[in-house]
Image: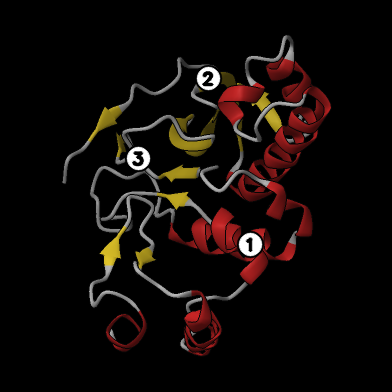
Amino acid sequence: ANLSHNFADGTIEITSRANLQLRAIRNQDLPNIIESTSLAGLLPSPQHDRVRNIVTSPIAGLDREELLDPRPLIRELDRQLRAEPIIANLHPKFSFAIHGGPSRFSRDLDDIAIEAVDINSAPQFHLSIGGASSGLTVNLSDAVECMLATAKMCIRLAHECSVPVRAKAVMKIPGALKHITDALSHLLTPSPMPPPSHTVNDA
């Protein structure tokens, strides 16, 4: 609030990706804003700040329909995103989604999404890339590694084919989905059930 009052237009906006946004900032005030934001703990990794877009339910951990609480995975994914220099090459709107249950809280097709499914009384995650179902699942213990590896494959294929580093663009490359899933075959298993239906919740 102080930064907005002193260096912007006095308002704070909350974006669709849960970021705080200030407007009407002057170039000469940027160093003060960056330093203050960092000291407040709101800028843990400047080089990764634009690519830490993780979507989940606003009531994660409280929803009775959830198969598991996704918050520990979200924290671990964020930690590992910040530890990988190559991840800074993702598109600023590249999004990761972790859903612990049947309700989705994202209206857009996320670049990489995992959704909890109950298989033989053991929760696993169904993997989608750019909105396309992979038909494969990943264990809880491998979920974060799988998402990071998928993102790295998207970066590689996007650069090789000169397309934006968005999963939807990568999925238009012939054979991209198979190429990615083959590379991650040590983490993935065929799903014995159809992909979960997507329910958008307006909560």
Give neighbour class at mark 2: few <14, some 14-19, many 20+ (Cα, 10 Å).
some
Query: At 61% across and 40% down in the image, what residue appears?
Result: 139
Q: Amino acid at mark 3?
A: Gly
Label 2: which residue? 133
Against 97, residue 38 (above or below) is below
Residue 148 at what x, y percent from top left?
68, 46
Q: Position of residue 108 (x, y in %)?
A: 37, 32
Q: Secondary structure at mark 2?
A: strand
Towards the viewer: 162 or 108: 162
21 sits left or right of 34 in the view = left
Where, by quadrant of the figure, is residue 78 drawn? bottom right
Residue 96: horizontal and vertical position, in percent?
52, 44
The residue wearing badge 1 is: 48
Camera-nearest residue between 158 and 29: 29
Spatial distance from mark 2 to mark 3, Cα to Cα?
A: 16 Å
Considering the image in quadrants, where does the N terminus appear?
bottom left
